[in-house]
Amino acid sequence: MAELVDKQMEETEDDPIMPDEVDPSEGSLQQNISISSLMLMDGGSAGSHEMIPGCSYKSSSYRSSENCAKFPDHIKQKEDMEIQDVVRQYALCFLPAKSLCRFKTVSKEWLRWINCPFFVHTQTNHFRHISGLFCQFPGESPSFMSLNPVAYGVPNPTLCFLPEPVVARTSCNGLLGCQSRLGDNAYYICNPVTEGWRMVPKPNLYHGPETAIALAFEPDILNFEAQYELICAVTLPDRAALQFEIYSSRTNSWRVCNAVCLELDALLLNGDGFYTRGFVYWETESGAVLVFDLKEEVYGIVSLPPSRKPTGALTVMQGELCYLLPHKEDDAWSIEVYGNMDMSLQCIIPLHSEFLGHLVDGECRALAFVNDDTLIITLGTKVIAYHVRAHRMKRVSDARTDGFVKYFPYVNSFAPVGPFMHDAT
């Protein structure tokens, strides 16, 4: 036995550092691990031994200390990188999904890199730019309105890749929350870029047509699994109250919160809400905002300004909740911005008539404030992106005037739906 131990120790000394084998066809690392047992004498007592496992990382590619110092050929050192390597490794993750889909044609290497799960995860965390707005007109399929058609887009804005016709209801960081237009009213979570989707299990409570929902998704750089929640404010059929039911992608199941909202100001919600920084916000028909703390699972009420109108919009401006209200004086339009917990007037954004032209005569409706600088409004028959700092206007699309269209911001990312997703074939 002692001879066996001496032989194992000699092999270890001849091969002090054993790098991983490189598979040239896949570029992946494979570890060849062999477990040996070392016999140690127990304090001089003859015949007493203790088994201690040892690990040896061996490779047939390197058999000398000189070769061990050689950098693997499939990994490029920074000084050996060319410009295309720098762009691929450090810049692509900051681009929108539509641009990245075009860049897949640059080379097979770029195709493999953009398709790999690590890059998908990185792009989801780094690209948070609002790319456009999904539009939902009653009784019709969804549509997409891009803020830059060259850079942002989805292959099927009507979401026809889903197994049944749906209504788009909510969006968060690249994922959409939809609901079937058929009798079962099933919920779906999907990514319109990758066309991956998940059908949500049937909830525990009855979700009638007055149920308001919001999708909460915060990409986490330390978590590769998609973790999101669908929060539903459900009107109870047998009492004047709201209860909150939450679907979690972590468990693929629903839970009913203990909190029950009995506030009269919050019982009738004005459509679906949105999520930001741990809170969900729904506008009510009585001129208030129902706020739900997703972590603590408690609710609160915030009052809207008394001058609110149907043409106003509850949105997020530079990370803070605010209310946008169009106001016209003489022949000039402006947007009043209300904020803080008391929803007091914070500032006024003038819409310079020299940039609006004849559109100044149309009705103005606020939609959202996105990317810290851009105000999205409808003016007359046009949807306009108004860049506040530059006082620059860009026509995004034509606006529907034959009914009330719901718009909600969308991020053009590769956000994964999760392990239960269905891939387009």
Image (cartoon, rainbow, N blue to C red):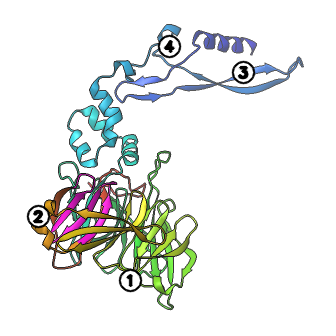
Instruction: Give the residue type at disc 4.
Output: Cys
CA separation in Å, label 2 and label 3: 86 Å
Q: Which mark is residue 285?
A: 1
Element on which disc 3 rests: strand
CA separation in Å, label 4 and label 3: 25 Å
| Label 2 vs label 1, nearer the camera | 2
| Label 1 vs label 3, nearer the camera | 1
Q: Are marks 4 and 1 in contact (CB under 8 Å)?
A: no
Disc 4: which residue: 68
Q: Earlier in the sequence, mark 4 or mark 3?
A: 3
> Does the magenta stretch mainly form a helix, a strand or a loop?
strand
Q: Position of residue 148 (x, y in %)?
A: 20, 52
Instruction: Give the residue type at disc 1.
Output: Glu
Viewer can see residue 164: no
Residue 385 colored in magenta in the image = yes
Q: Earlier in the sequence, mark 4 or mark 1?
A: 4
Q: Which mark is residue 38?
A: 3
* Range of magenta residues: 365-391
Q: Position of residue 71 (x, y in %)?
A: 43, 17
Question: What residue sits 40% from the left and 41% below the top?
Answer: 118
CA separation in Å, label 2 and label 4: 71 Å
Element on which disc 1 rests: loop
Seen from the viewer's position, the closer of residues 204 and 45 is 204
Task: Tell me if 147 is positioned left or right of 2 in this view.
Answer: left
Residue 378 colored in magenta in the image = yes
Disc 2: which residue: 357
